[in-house]
Every structure is written in C-alpha cells, then in structure tokens.
Image (cartoon, rainbow, N blue to C red):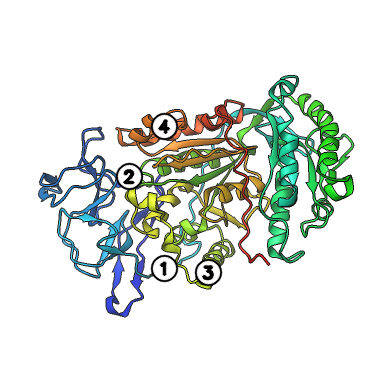
Amino acid sequence: MLTEIRLFEKKRKNAAFSRSYRFLSVPAISALSFIRGFDMSDTRQFVSLHPEDNVLVAVIAIQGGQELEHDGSGIRLQEDIPAGHKFACKRIAPGDAILKFGQIIGFASKEIEPGQWVHVHNVTRGDIDLDHQIAQDIPETVYDETIPNFQGYRRANGKAGTRNYIAVISTVNCSATSARMVVNQITPDILARYPHVDGVIALTHEAGCAFEFQGSDHEQLNRTLAGYANHPNVCGYLVLGLGCETAQGSYLIESHNLVQLNAGKAGEAETPSLLFNIQDQGGVAKTVKRALEVIPDLLQQANQCRREPIPISELIVATECGGSDGYSGITANPAIGYASDRIVRSRGTVILSEVPEIYGGEHLLTRRAVSVEVGEKLLERIRWWEDYAQKFNQQIDNNPSVGNKRGGLTTIYEKSLGAISKAGTTALCDVYTYAEPVTQKGLVVMDTPGYDPASVTGMIAGGATVSLFSTGRGSCYGSKPTPTIKICSNTATFERLQDDMDVNAGEVLRQGGLKKTGEEIFQMIIDVASGKQTKSEQQDIGDEEFCPWSPGPIF
C-alpha cells in the first residue's frame, strides 16, 4: 500500500529567491508509482516520476534533436541526454525549483528551456526550509500471518546468526599487523578440517590511540569492537592489543562485559574473553604464536554449531547505497524498500543508514516517526551533521561524489530522496547512534556517515546479520562477518559486472517489475541468511572492509 504525505511547504532561504513552494502529496516509497504515459517496456526512452515534476529522466542515452511526446505535447531535445540523467519538460526560470519525485532537488542557476539537459552546469543546491512535521502520518503495519524461517545459528545468548566466523580483534593499529599474521597462517587446508566454520577474520583498523580515554571517539570505537565480538555471526574471538594504547583491551572487555557466549549452547558456562597484549607476551612473534595456540580450540567449538530453522523476524537487515546513479532512486532503492516492507511485516528489523544521505529528505521520515521523541532524535542527528560540516568549512553537498554526478545525480537532495526509498513505507520506530546495539523491531535509522565501509561497519556492529547494498556505477563491496547482497540499478552495469552483482534491479522498469524484483530480493535475504553465498563471498571479499568511523580529532 502506498503511504502518502499531505501538503507541505518548502522555502528557499536565499532572499534573492525568497519563494514558497507548495506541492501535492508525495509517495513514501516509490516514485515508480507515479510513472505515467508509458507501457512498462524496455523500448521507452524516459520516465516521468511525478505529475508536478519539471524534469524527466532518460532511461537510455537519447540523441539530441529528437522530438519526444510527453503529456500530449512534443519536446524537442536540444542536446544529447546521457542515460540516467534529467532533461526539462517545462521552461524553468532562474531561481525556480527543480522538481523530481514531486520534491525540490535544487534551483535553476540559469534559464532552462524544455529539452535541455538539467545537471550541475545549470542547477545549484540552494537552501531549503523543510516542514519537519513529526508523527503526523504514522502508517499502520499489517503483519503477515505466516512468517518464513531461515536456516541460521541459534547462539547461547538467544541471538540468531547467519554465518559462523572466528574473529581476531585488534584494539589499535599497532596490533593490526599481528592480527593479520595470525589469520594468514590459518590456511585453507586448516579450515577444511572445520567444514561448519565460515572462516577466521582479522578486524584491523587505523585507530585506537591519540584520542581521549573514555572520550566520544574512544567509546564509539569500543562500542564498534564490542559489537563485532558479540555479533551473532561471530562464534568466538580473541583480542590483540599492543599494551600501551588508549583503547585498552581490558577496558573493552570490562566495559561491555565481553564473554565467549556464541560458541556454546544456552545454559552453558560462560568462557572468559581471550586478550593478548604484544608488550606482555614478549613481542610480535610470541604474540602470534600464543594466538595460534588457542585458535584451534575456538575453531573446534565453532565447528560444533549447526544451522536450524529460525523465524526471519529475528533478522536485522542493513541497507546501504554505494556508487549510486540516476537509476538508483527509481529502481534499486525502491525495490529494496519493497523488500524492507516484507521484512518489517514479518516482524523483523531494517536499518536505514547514512544520515548525510537522508539530508534534505528527512521530513518524509519524521512524519512517519512513531513518536515525537523518535522524530526529534532524527532531527538532532541532522543538526549534528550540519554543525560537523560547518566546523570543517564544508558543505554536506560535497556528497554526491564525482561518480554519482557522472551517473546523473546532481545534488544531495536528489540523492537523499532516492536513498530514502530503501526504507519502504512503514513507520520509523527508532534512531540509533553509530554502532549502538539495535534492539527495536521494525524500521530504524542508524547515524552513520555516507562512506560505505564505515557505514556498513556501524550497522554490523549494531547487530545487522544481512546487508542489502544498492549500486548503479558498480560498487564491488563485500563484508565479513555479515554477507552483502548487491542490487544493481541498471541492466547495463549488471551485465558488465555479473561476477559482482546479485540482483538486476534494471528489471524494475518492466511491467510489474517493482514487485517482482522486490520479491526476488526478499527471497534472496532468506536464502543468503540460510547460507547461500553472495557474489562477494564467492570471491572472498570482505576482509579489508572493517572500517570504524572516528569523527573526532587525532592528537
């Protein structure tokens, strides 16, 4: 069911263009619901996403000079339009709003005639005031009567895992090489003795010192490392430190009460965490030797674990954009949104991330927040990012990236409106800080940066057991210990990168394609959670993508 947002106003702050804009209702899930005037076939050249829009989106590259029909009248293209890019269907005066999805995505920096390419050369972001109504249109979720199962690992603490890894956790960059040396000596022939173990991973990073003890950066890193140690996809772990770093391994273990919970069965005695500091062990070589002495015991315990039927209501699904293009917000992300609704209707959890890529569209989420408190939590995060950017004399509009713009995305508002569609149509139930354990069912937001590895790392630390990753330009991201399903926004990229892409969301542009692709993603979530390998897993991608976010200064 399509949830609609009622009338709202936006006003540009710049006094030179001090106009108020009032728009019709806007969909909370999919711009495709407003595609009109075309049969859903691969032969059409462009799409109209909303009746109020003054731009159209090229489905394929269109040569200039062609006469196109739209709304009963002709539009002559005045120049070539790249695939995924926008062109004007109405005259747009300087300072007028550019409308896509029925929303402002920027303002014309010069006059734009019908048939002209609309992009960074004639569009400026500008500033907009959003009507942040909170908890005004809370959708009611009708839960499915039958909830499917996946074949997962039931851990001793009651959590449900989709993979079965051993982790070697580095507290600081100074112990990263040692952690990597340990894992490199666990060769494929050794792992072959433990067929029920997915692997041994080294969680290494570049932080861990030169910040305030128990300061915000320290506690955030601590929370991230603890989230991986306690993760239901990690059966056992050991911690490697240097000994003199700020991020002490002993503090990590004590502050989060870390014990080896995942390797045993419910009711079994807890096993203490394993911590080896290089300075205490007598150097790198002795530390590596000591770690290798205990790894076989962890592998043996993990190898005793077996998959069993678990309701998908216990899944926590991360959603992420990476290498987005002009198709992402009309194919891949709405299809993920469809699958997200299926997960929520099955009483599972979906995480929407990347607050800088919610920026400019957050009003669509605050309206469906379950409470004023939840809506305000999101706005507080938006304000934090505005302040953070200002401190460094930056604009959040530095995102979209170069590749995003080449793919057709012009401003952060446009990118955000497309990215939000990953959230589907259900109510916003909570907002979490980076790497905070996610306990609320339903749709939630986690405050992460837009940088993909750091964002996904935060969601995994929060408990995500499956990740959905949309891409248009062709990101080849993978992650461990949580598998990544990559959804490609267009058929051309999918066919070029078939070894890396799991789902072709270009099929959304066919008749009935949104539901079909959304159901395909939903079924793949169940299959991957049950052990089916993703394309990134088949290529053993994911060892280098652990990337804790550290927003503060390094001293």
- Mark 4 or 2, nearer chain start: 2
Q: Is mark 4 on a helix, strand or loop?
A: loop
Marks 2/3: CA distance?
32 Å
Q: Nearer the viewer, mark 1 or mark 3?
A: 3
Looking at the image, residue 49 sits to the left or right of residue 351; the answer is left
Percent position (x, y) of residue 521?
A: 47, 33
Which amino acid lies under the numbered mark 3 shown in the image of this protein?
A: Arg
Give residue 497's mark.
4
Residue 148 to residue 433: above or below: above
Q: Residue at x 61, y 47 (%)?
A: 457
Rounded to the nearest whole Å, what is the CA distance between mark 1 and mark 2?
Answer: 23 Å
**Callout 1: helix, strand or loop?**
loop
Comes first in the chain, label 4 or label 1 = 1
- Earlier residue among tags 4 and 3: 3
Residue named by callout 3:
383
Secondary structure of residue under mark 2: helix
The percent position of residue 173, horizontal first and vertical second, equals: 71, 51
The CA span between labels 4 and 3 is 38 Å
Mark 1 and mark 2 residues within 8 Å of each other at the beta carbon? no
Residue 159 can be seen, yes or no: no
Residue that appears at 16% across and 61% down: 91
